[in-house]
Amino acid sequence: MAEYIDIKGQNVLVVSSDPENPTVGQIWYNSTSNTLKGLGVSTVGAWATGGNMNTARGELAGCGSQTAGLAFGGYSAPTGYTGTTEEYDGASWTTSPGSLGTARASFTGCGTQIAGLAFGGQGPTPAYSALTEEYDGSTWSPGGNLGTARRFLASAGTQTAGLGFGGDFGPPTASTLTEEYDGSTWTSGGSLNTSREQLGGAGTQTAGLAFGGYTGTANTGATEEYNGTSWTTSPGSMNTTRRYFTGTGLQTAALGFGGTLPPTTAATEEYNGTSWATVNSLNTARAQLAGAGTISAGLAFGGEAPPYTNATEEWNGAGSPLTKTISVD
């Protein structure tokens, strides 16, 4: 004999606001917005609009995750170089009371929202910077200086196990230099095989990834993997060669997005440890942006579209939970 639930089905939950932690397959009716919603799994990754930053800027740095992101420094007109720091909670940005000790741009960062690392770059003076600063969730404090001052370098790792690579000492000198940070001191690591600046980075200190960038004469899509000692060129090259872009994720699961060819691009690619695949583009094409997160939950913020932007986008990769909405008349 058929059960009642087989004949009548299940009741749909009626709520005045969306559940905070719905499960995949759950369906509910939001009486406030008059919408029927359900949580499924995305089959194709896509970018969605997030909360705007409070300060529009480019050449900034970032780290953290999609729900706990950190943005710091950069350059904006007419303000110029800034040390402003903002924290993202997955919906909105809050300006931190802690600002970088030295305002700068064209630098990089790694770590988490409560244990961030900022290093390199260029400030109000023409000289390039070797300065390193550490963030504890509220304030920045000085760390050990890079062995070689430079800008437009990339990064990977954490506050106590950081990796900095590439960059330039002054046009047109692109660098192969790699340095490793132990929480207090930088030491030399293995050199990149391809000199470059304005490149993307991802991974950890012992499993880093360098990709794309500018060699000093042309853009490159070359990808290299670091094992903690040396770099090996991957057979997989980016499909869109570019510079002034950013990346996030791991050595075997990375995301590269934005940049300039020129012109400015919104192109996004995923790396699986062997090859790059082109996926859905950013909604706003931009260069000199920052990023955070993973290949399944990424974050893109700031940059120059132009003009300088405060736009934030959230990447939800294939296989990620995705809320679908059906309007009800």
Image: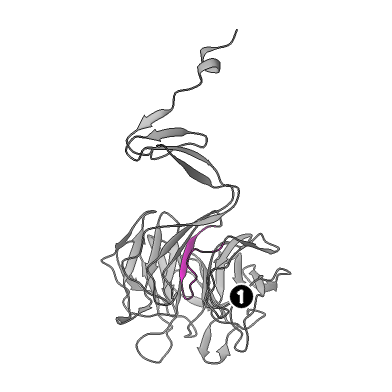
Residue 224, relative to residue 292: is it above or below?
below
Dividing the picture into quarters, in which one does residue 114 lie?
bottom left
Q: Locate residue 165 relative to residue 53 in the image: left or right.
A: right
Q: Please say whether residue 115 is one of the residues in the magenta stretch.
A: no
Region in magenta:
281-294
Dividing the picture into quarters, in which one does residue 191 lie?
bottom right
User: What residue occupies the far left of the structure in this picture?
Assistant: 97
Q: Position of residue 292 (x, y in %)?
A: 47, 62
Q: Residue at x 51, y 64 (%)?
A: 282
Q: Residue at x 54, y 77 (%)?
A: 260
Residue 106, relative to residue 93: is it above or below?
below
Neighbours of disc 1 within 10 Å: few (<14), some (14-19), many (20+): many
Q: Which residue is mark 1?
A: 212
User: What residue occupies the far top of the structure in this picture?
Assistant: 1
The N terminus, quarter of image: top right
Which secondary structure is most common in the magenta stretch?
loop
Q: Please say whether residue 293 is one of the residues in the magenta stretch.
A: yes
Q: Position of residue 284 (x, y in %)?
A: 47, 67
Q: Position of residue 10 (x, y in %)?
A: 48, 22
Q: Residue at x 74, y 69 (%)?
A: 235
Viewer-proximal residue, 308 or 180? 308
Viewer-proximal residue, 250 or 37? 37
Q: Locate residue 53 relative to residue 22 in the image: left or right.
A: left
Dividing the picture into quarters, in which one does residue 91 lie?
bottom left
Q: Locate residue 201 relative to residue 21 in the image: left or right.
A: right
Q: Secondary structure at mark 1?
A: loop
Viewer-proximal residue, 274 or 58? 58
